[in-house]
Image: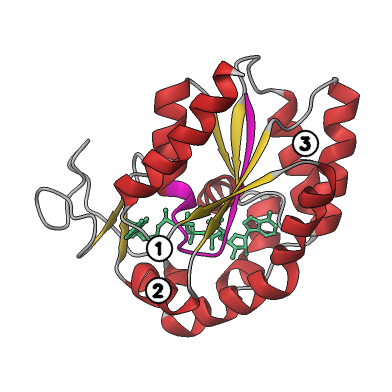
Amino acid sequence: MRIVLLGAPGAGKGTQCKRIVGEYDLLHLSSGDILRQERAEGTELGKKAQSFMDSGGLVPDELIVAMMAGAVSKAPESGYVLDGFPRTVNQAEELGKSLADLGQRIDVVLNLQIDDKAVADRMTGRRSCPKCGAVYHIENLKSKVEGKCDDDGAELIQRPDDSLEVVSNRLATYHEQTEPVVGHYNEKSAVCDIDANESADSVTALIFDKLNALVKA
Ligand code: AP5
């Protein structure tokens, strides 16, 4: 199964992706995680991406498209979930061309819908594990021991782009450049809208219902 997960910053894409890949044995391909890894390793791509990420803008399409086309081409037959990609209509069109070359197609597009006013709270309260990528929230999804990852005990960190100012830029970028991607997929195939304002477990239940129906069809 090949899934695209769309949604504003803080809609819960990363949180839900981890649950989906666990349930359906898929690969999680997060453009944000790959970029953060490139930055941590000090690669040319990481250096080029840095200023765009820190300001809340988008990394240029040509860099992202090449990076994600490489990741998709190496993905296993069982499939994957694309998290944070595509983020512009141009990226979606380029993804379509790469998939056509591979004889593949996207089976479902899940669109996590969240109210803008919930985004700041989710972002500023987010804490992440630098070792395994697990995501927590200081109020909504607490770790068992404050400040430590449940899985490996690593010290949790706050992402530098989760400051209020950068979050507001990221949200504006989302409305301007990423929302039109929903329209792009609506023209081609049905997009499943999911109310992401609910609790993480309720959102997971909604997603699993959709995916189970798809698997059975
Ligand atoms: P990226 O890492 O993709 O960031 P994002 O899209 O802004 O999404 P986030 O990871 O911030 O949020 P999320 O939806 O995954 O929410 P999460 O599950 O963590 O991108 C970072 C940057 O990289 C971009 O700004 C851009 O510069 C660049 N980039 C990446 N891809 C690109 C591309 N394709 N093109 C160009 N540039 C690109 O949840 C958030 C918090 O809420 C957590 O604390 C969580 O515990 C909590 N939470 C989750 N769900 C719920 C719930 N239902 N109820 C309550 N709390 C919840």
Residue at image coords 70%, 64% = 178
Q: Is residue 211 left or right of residue 138?
A: right
> Dot 3, crowdedness within 10 Å: few (<14), some or many (≥20)?
some
Rendered location of residue 169, percent (x, y):
59, 80
Three-letter amino acid code at the position of disc 3: Ala
Residue at image coords 39%, 35% = 19
In the rendered image, which quarter contains the C terminus? Answer: top right
Magenta stretch: residue 9 in it?
yes
Mark 1 / mark 3, whichever is N-terminal: 3
Q: Secondary structure at mark 3?
A: helix
What span is colored magenta in the figure? 1-14
Q: Can I make out residue 198 in this image?
A: yes
Residue position marked by numbered label 3 in the rendering: 69
Mark on residue 197? 1
Magenta stretch: residue 49 in it?
no
Q: CA distance from mark 1 to mark 2?
A: 8 Å
Residue position marked by numbered label 2 in the rendering: 118
Farthest top residue in view: 77
Q: Secondary structure at mark 1?
A: loop
Q: Is mark 2 within 8 Å of ligand 1?
A: yes
**1 vs 2, front mark:** 1
